[in-house]
Image (cartoon, helix red, strand yellow):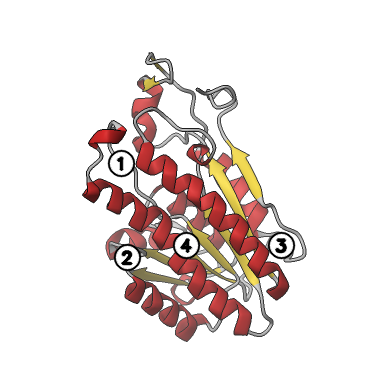
Amino acid sequence: MNSTSPHDKVALVTGAGSGIGKACAQALLRDGWRVVLAGRRLQPLQDAIAEAGDPWGDIGTRALAVSADVADAVAVEQLFDTLQQRFGRLDLLFNNAGVFTAPTPLEELSPAQWRSALDVNLSGPLLCTQQAFRLMKRQAPRGGRIINNGSISAHVPRPLSSPYTITKHAISGLTRAAALEGRAFDIAVGQIDIGNVATDMTELMAQGAMQADGSVRPEPRMRMDAVVSSFMAMARLPLEANVLTMTVMATGMPYVGRG
């Protein structure tokens, strides 16, 4: 689907107030989707909608900002109730919300640090996937697509990043388990693993990031539009086709051979 006008497809993007989630939610809106933007803080979500542009003059009816903590099961249930009340169905879930942890040796990782990473990076996508399955199975026509935001760290770790790496490896397991369970119900589940994107968050990587050999070297980054176009290629697929995993990264990024 490459829409030039609004259509009936409905998407939910978590962590939509900034970064990759914001850019992908805005791309969906510009592509004609009806989009629920979810995140902990309401104002950034509302700003993202306002900044998306309004080519058809109906952004107020096609976009909805909802404050929700994906680590909270009750909040996730309320989020999906709100979505269903507003739009009636769900065609695409982008499990994007996630948190980084400060570089920490494994043995110094506190229970609070571990719980924070686990709750948002893994429990959040699981809770959202559960709700999406329930809705996608019973809606008519049934089915839909779920895209999980993995990471290069779903394959190889960075130094001192055990909680982030563990949760992102687990996202790969969630993707495959959900893809298996979903295919009988026309639910396609895939994962996009994203390397260094040129944002404020990765500015330090451009100056120098710790490597597996202990050295610190600058790493190349890619523009956000490379991520968005890759995501949209997955989002627009018909349900009989699925990209199970996709890796998009700066060409010169030290991924192949890392470690």
- Image quadrant where residue 78 sits: bottom left
Circles 2 and 4: CB distance less than 8 Å? no
Where 259 sits versus 226, above or below?
A: above
Quick check: 187 left or right of 106?
right
Q: Residue at x 32, y 65 (%)?
A: 69
Say the numbered circle drawn on residue 1. Answer: 3
Q: Residue at x 58, y 56 (%)?
A: 175
Q: Earlier in the sequence, mark 4 or mark 1?
A: 4
Q: Earlier in the sequence, mark 2 or mark 1?
A: 2
Question: Which is more foreground, mark 2 or mark 4?
Answer: 2
Q: Along the line of sight, which residue is nearer the eye, 183 or 12?
A: 183
Tell me the amino acid under the disc marked 3. Answer: Met
Provide the residue designation for mark 2. 69
The picture places residue 223, in percent across and down from the top left corner, at 51, 35
Q: CA distance from mark 2 to mark 1?
A: 18 Å
Q: CA distance from mark 3 to mark 2?
A: 31 Å
Q: Residue at x 51, y 33 (%)?
A: 156
The picture places residue 237, in percent across and down from the top left corner, at 71, 59
Q: Earlier in the sequence, mark 3 or mark 2?
A: 3
Provide the residue designation for mark 1. 101
Provide the residue designation for mark 4. 13
Circles 4 and 1: CB distance less than 8 Å? no
Q: Residue at x 33, y 73 (%)?
A: 75
Q: Secondary structure at mark 2?
A: loop
Q: Along the line of sight, which residue is nearer the eye, 93 or 107?
A: 107
Q: Residues within 10 Å of mark 4 (few under 14, many from 20)?
A: many
Q: Residues within 10 Å of mark 3 (few under 14, many from 20)?
A: few
The picture places residue 180, in percent across and down from the top left corner, at 67, 63
